[in-house]
Amino acid sequence: MIITAIVLFSLAALLGIFLLTFVLKGKETPKAVTFTHGPLAAAGLVVLIIYAFQSSPAPIASLILFIIAAAGGFVLITVDLTSSSVPKWLALVHGLIAAAAFIMLLKFAF
């Protein structure tokens, strides 16, 4: 189950990096990619939550960071849909928190 979460987060990360290039260039993000990135990450988070409840020890630190990153993602998609530009700093912080959570998850799993 943890491998499923890692695969989902990996795919979400690749799309997130692609989206970040648009944000950093000040361009509009492709909505199809945006609406794929979020559900992939959310699915990974759901799988990770289920894993955490079923396993001991559980990757709690990684889970907490992914939840924080998800909250940032909700803010980002809201800003993206309601205004003309996403704050670059927020996109970077969101990505860095998610990357830290992913690295912690990999260290836990392997």
Image (cartoon, rainbow, N blue to C red):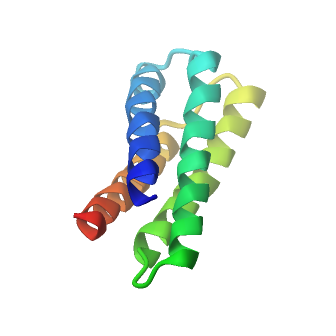
Q: Quadrant of residue 21?
A: top left
In the rendering, at what x and y percent does residue 34 appear? 59, 27
Q: Residue at x 51, y 15 (%)?
A: 27
Q: Is residue 49 above or below residue 53?
A: above
Q: Nearer the viewer, residue 45 or 64?
A: 45
Compared with 8, 107 (above or below) is below
Quadrant location of the C terminus?
bottom left
Q: Could you tell whether 76 is left or right of 13 in the image?
A: right
Residue at image position (35%, 51%) is 99
- Between 24 and 1, the residue placed more toward the observer is 1
- Residue 68 visible: no
Q: Where does the image place residue 106, in percent across and percent down from the top left?
A: 28, 59
Q: Residue at x 67, y 36 (%)?
A: 77
Q: Is residue 46 visible?
A: yes
Work out whether residue 93 or residue 14 is closer to the camera in this orientation and state it: 14
At horizontal 49% and vertical 41% (from top left) the residue drawn is 91
Residue 39 drawn at (x, y percent) = 63, 38
Task: Using the image, determine if residue 60 lies above or below residue 24.
Answer: below
User: Is 10 or 65 nearer to us in this picture?
Assistant: 10
The residue furthest bottom is: 56
Q: Quadrant of residue 49?
A: bottom right
Q: Residue 68: x, y in percent?
A: 55, 62
Number of numbered tags placed on the structure image? 0
Q: Is residue 5 left or right of residue 45?
A: left
Vertical position of residue 16 compared to residue 101: above or below:
above
Residue 7 placement, left or right of 34? left
